Amino acid sequence: MSRKGNRQTEAFELRVGSELVGSKGVYIVKEFLGEGGFGKVAKCSKLWSLEYYAVKIMKISREGQKEFEKMKMIQDLDPDENHLIKMYECFTYRNMTCIVYELLEVNFHDSLMNEQQLVPLCYIRVIAQQLLKALKALKSIGVAHCDIKLDNIMFEDLNDMNVKLIDFGLAVETNELLTGTKIQVTQFRAPEVILGLPLDESVDMWALGMVLACIYCGYYLFPSSTEYETIRAMVQIFGLPEADSVSQSVSQSVSQSVSQSVSQSISQSINFHLFSFYLFICSFHEN
């Protein structure tokens, strides 16, 4: 077997105790925190150091390079100040792309699963303020996250409710968001994505609103078995707009009556999504 073949085999035999040699040190895999189509995330210690990091390990690909490029843009924003995950370095080792991130405590999904009661509204306000600051920072550099969900928001410190937005593997520059692009998981998918309308960074605001509503209620706000059911539920909450405002670009797969009832409810600005969620939360709070 060729030397190249051996190196490729070693890349797939990543295990606890494996060493990843970067430009700023050697990282030793202590445990695996997650795994997906992208690769694996490992908790690693740094050789001759007491520090721990989260290392995202992927087969060399364009996706890994794109994530690194987006993270380089984000580092100029001051990740701590703007509640964005901090990247330390990116390197290639044994046919793998490795991105070294700060190690955070627990994501929202796991935290909610372990809670015996709903999160108080005063805590949700703090979390919302921090994540709105993160989205404002991303907007300032023309980047949309495109995958905001419970799993991609993590606590930096559970004691003071400090949170950070993570996983920019699907992030894109806003001017690259094409009409009809399918992004976001269904539970957090913005209506303009479902209907094939023009997209901008407001898709992230919608997803954030769904996250906050989920934290408050303890369940997903809209059904997600089909996009039709999701849109139908949105109409029941946001009401019926004027029929003459129906966009000509609405997806043909959605019935005409549903298209008419939802199109006006879709805003191209962040303010609409934020205001809609605010009204929704207030209605629950009053009841």
Image (cartoon, grey):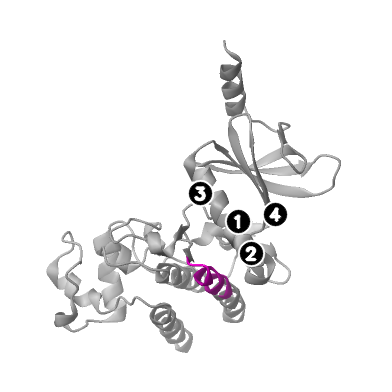
Secondary structure mostly seen in the magenta stretch? helix
Rendered image quadrant of residue 250: bottom left
Which mark identifies residue 233?
none
Q: Which comes before the other along the chain, label 2 or label 4?
A: 2
Q: Amino acid at mark 3?
A: Lys
Which mark identifies residue 66?
3
User: At numbered mark 1, what does the secondary structure look like: helix, strand or loop?
Assistant: helix
Structural crowding at the residue carrying mark 1, measured as other residues with C-alpha within 10 Å and reported as few (<14), some (14–19) or many (≥20): some
Q: Relative to residue 172, is residue 196 drawn left or right? A: left
- Estimate the x, y position of residue 74 in percent, counting from the top left: 59, 61
**Between marks 2 and 4 in the image, the one whose residue lies nearer the viewer:** 2
In this figure, which residue is indicated by the disc labeled 2? 76
Calculate the distance from the C-alpha at mark 3 to the C-alpha at mark 1: 10 Å
Structural crowding at the residue carrying mark 4, measured as other residues with C-alpha within 10 Å and reported as few (<14), some (14–19) or many (≥20): some
Q: Amino acid at mark 1?
A: Lys
Q: Which comes before the other along the chain, label 1 or label 4?
A: 1
Q: Amino acid at mark 4?
A: Glu
Residue 116, compared with residue 102, is above or below; it is below
Q: Which residues are magenta?
A: 133-142
In this figure, which residue is indicated by the disc labeled 1? 72
